[in-house]
Image (spheres, rainbow, N blue to C red):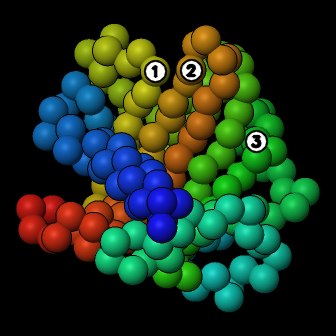
C-alpha cells in the first residue's frame, strides 16, 4: 500500500512539473509561441497507440495516476538520432493508457545545447532578445498540439529536449486534480 502512495505522489509531482510551462505561457519572457506546429515529433504522432511501435521496449512502469491512467516509459534498443550534428542516444517515449504522450531526448555538453537551440529555433520559432537574456536552464516553445522544452543543467553538463502533447498531458492532469481550470 505504501509503494502505491509513493507512485501516486511521484506521478502528481511529475505532472505538476510538466504543466508548469503551460502555466507560464501567458508570460512571453518564459516561452516562444510555436510556428509551423506539428502534431508529434519525427514519425511519431501524439496519441498514436503503442501497438503502432512494435520495436519499443518498456523500460519503466510509472504506475497509475489517481484517475486510473497507466503511465509507462519505453525505448527502442540501439536507436540513435542526430539533430544539427548532436547525437542523441537516449530517447524515451512516455505513453499514457497506451497513447504516445511525450518523447524525451538526452544530450551532453553546452556545445550540444547550443546546436540544439539553433535547431529548435529553426523548426519552431526564434527567441526574442529578452527571451534569450532570461534563459538560464530552460527554454520553451508552446503550441496547441505540441510543446517543446530544451533544458540544460550546467553542473551536470547534460540536458534534455522534450516534445510533449499538451492535450494528453492536460487530460491526465485534469483526472488527477479533479478537472477544472485547465484548457
Q: Secondary structure at mark 2?
A: strand
Which residue is denoted by mark 3 in the rendering?
88
Above or below — where is 75 with respect to 141? below
Across and down, in percent, residue 130 comes to 26, 15
Which residue is denoted by mark 2 in the rendering?
153
Q: Is residue 174 left or right of residue 17?
A: left
Mark pair 3, 2: CA separation = 16 Å
Q: Secondary structure at mark 3?
A: strand
Across and down, in percent, residue 62 comes to 56, 63
Snapshot quadrant of residue 78: bottom right
Across and down, in percent, residue 99 comes to 52, 79
Could you tell me if the residues under marks 3 and 1 are in contact, i.e. CB atoms within 8 Å?
no
* Picture residue at 68% right of the left edge, 86% below the top: 52
Q: Is residue 142 left or right of residue 137?
A: left
What label sits on residue 137 in the rendered view? 1
Could you tell me if the residues under marks 1 and 2 are in contact, i.e. CB atoms within 8 Å?
yes
Across and down, in percent, residue 167 comes to 32, 69
Q: Secondary structure at mark 1?
A: loop
Snapshot quadrant of residue 145: bottom left
* Picture residue at 83% right of the left edge, 51% below the top: 80
Upstream in sequence: badge 1 or badge 2:
1
Q: Residues within 10 Å of mark 2 (few under 14, many from 20)?
A: some
The answer to whether residue 171 is seen in the rendering is no
* Picture residue at 46% right of the left edge, 54% below the top: 6
Mark pair 3, 1: CA separation = 19 Å
What label sits on residue 93 in the rendered view? none
Q: Is residue 44 left or right of residue 96?
A: right
Residue lying at the far right of the rendered structure: 78
Mark pair 1, 2: CA separation = 6 Å
Amino acid at each position: 500500500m505504501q509503494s502505491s502512495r509513493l507512485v501516486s505522489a511521484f506521478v502528481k509531482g511529475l505532472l505538476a512539473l510538466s504543466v508548469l510551462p503551460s502555466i507560464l505561457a501567458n508570460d512571453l519572457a518564459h516561452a516562444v509561441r510555436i510556428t509551423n506546429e506539428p502534431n508529434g515529433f519525427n514519425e511519431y504522432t501524439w496519441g498514436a497507440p503503442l501497438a503502432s511501435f512494435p520495436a519499443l521496449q518498456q523500460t519503466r512502469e510509472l504506475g497509475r495516476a489517481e484517475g486510473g491512467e497507466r503511465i509507462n516509459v519505453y525505448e527502442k534498443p540501439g536507436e540513435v538520432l542526430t539533430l544539427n550534428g548532436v547525437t542523441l542516444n537516449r530517447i524515451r517515449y512516455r505513453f499514457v493508457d497506451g497513447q504516445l504522450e511525450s518523447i524525451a531526448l538526452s544530450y551532453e555538453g553546452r556545445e550540444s545545447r547550443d546546436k540544439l537551440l539553433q535547431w529548435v529555433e529553426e523548426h519552431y520559432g526564434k527567441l526574442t532578445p529578452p527571451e534569450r537574456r532570461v534563459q538560464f536552464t530552460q527554454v520553451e516553445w508552446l503550441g496547441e498540439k505540441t510543446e517543446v522544452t530544451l533544458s540544460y543543467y550546467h553542473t551536470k553538463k547534460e540536458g534534455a529536449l522534450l516534445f510533449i502533447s499538451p492535450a494528453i498531458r492536460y487530460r491526465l492532469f485534469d483526472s488527477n486534480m479533479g478537472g477544472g481550470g485547465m484548457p
